[in-house]
Each structure stands twice: as structure tokens, then as C-alpha cells.
Image: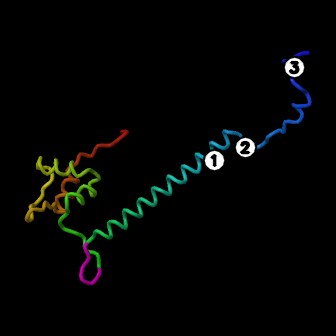
Amino acid sequence: MGANRPNARFLSAVPVVSGPSPGDVARRIEARLEGAAAELEELKAEVAALAALALAPSGGDGAVVAPKLLTVRQAAAALGVGESTVHALIRSGELGSRKIGSSRRIPVEEVDAFIARLPADRVGA
């Protein structure tokens, strides 16, 4: 007879699967990823704070003393730029620095003065 005709007994034996739609699953996964990304950012901030405390010099009584001279790496972190950018700023004279032996140090006042000289560009205005 008809080879293309479905078998009614076979179709009635197929269980109906109910559950979340693929869209629901994708939305749940997306929400979990967003939560994980937010938690990762919080952890990165905590690690950065701990690293800053670990790198900060301390006085004899254990109190944290703010450095007056920064390394190129510390100045880069304070400005939110890379070390090569700090070196370029020093070479161009835009950021003052001092040599102490073979080390290059940037006074905190120089970093503050450089920031104060930056133009007040407003994004989206």
C-alpha cells in the first residue's frame, strides 16, 4: 500500500516532550553569564585593591604611607595608561620625572599637574 503513509500506531507511541523552549534556555544562560561577568568585575576590583595595599610602602608602625615618587608602572596605573605611554609622556616633557641612580621616578605632584593640564573634553556633548 502507501509506503509514504505514516504508521498511526508508531505516531501515538511517540511521547510529547514538554519543557523550556530554546529561547527560555538561552535567556537563562545569558542572565547567568551577565551575573558571572558582574561578579568577575567585582573580584578584579578587590584584587586590584589588595595589590595596591601590598605594593604600598608602610611606615615603621605598620601604617600605610603614600609614596611621593612613583615608578613608571605606578604612574601608568594612576593615569590608566600603559607604561609605554608614560615613557612617551616623559620623553615629550609632558610628564616630569627624576633619575635616582638608574631608576626613573615620577613625583606624585607631576602626575597631578599632568592631569590638571588635560583638556576638559566631554564625550557625547
Name the spot of residue 55 as percent of width and height, x first. Answer: 28, 68
Binning the other alpha carbons within 10 Å of mark 1 as few (below 14), some (14 to 19) or many (20 upward) gives few
- The residue that disc 1 covers is 28
Question: How far apart, in angstroms, are the residues tagged by discs 3 and 1?
Answer: 40 Å
Horizontally, is 108 left or right of 50 in the view? left
Q: Looking at the image, which residue is at 37% across and 65% down?
A: 49
Badge count: 3
Q: Looking at the image, which residue is at 32% across and 66% down?
A: 52
Question: How far apart, in angstroms, are the residues tagged by discs 1 and 2?
Answer: 10 Å
- Quick one: 98 or 114, which is closer to the camera? 98
Name the spot of residue 15 as percent of width and height, x first. Answer: 84, 39
Q: Are marks 1 and 2 in contact (CB under 8 Å)?
A: yes
Nearer the camera: disc 3 or disc 1: 3
Q: Amino acid at mark 2?
A: Pro
What range is drawn magenta here?
57-62
Name the spot of residue 23 as percent of width and height, x first. Answer: 66, 39
- As drawn, which residue projects farthest toward the bottom? 61
3 or 1: tag closer to the N-terminus: 3
Q: Amino acid at mark 3?
A: Arg
Magenta part mainly helix, strand or loop? loop
- Quick one: 55 or 96, which is closer to the camera? 55
Looking at the rendered structure, which numbered label has been put on residue 20? 2
Of the 4 image quadrants, the one containing the C terminus is top left
- Quick one: 40 or 122, which is closer to the camera? 40
Name the spot of residue 98 as percent of width and height, x first. Answer: 10, 60
Label 3 residue SS: loop
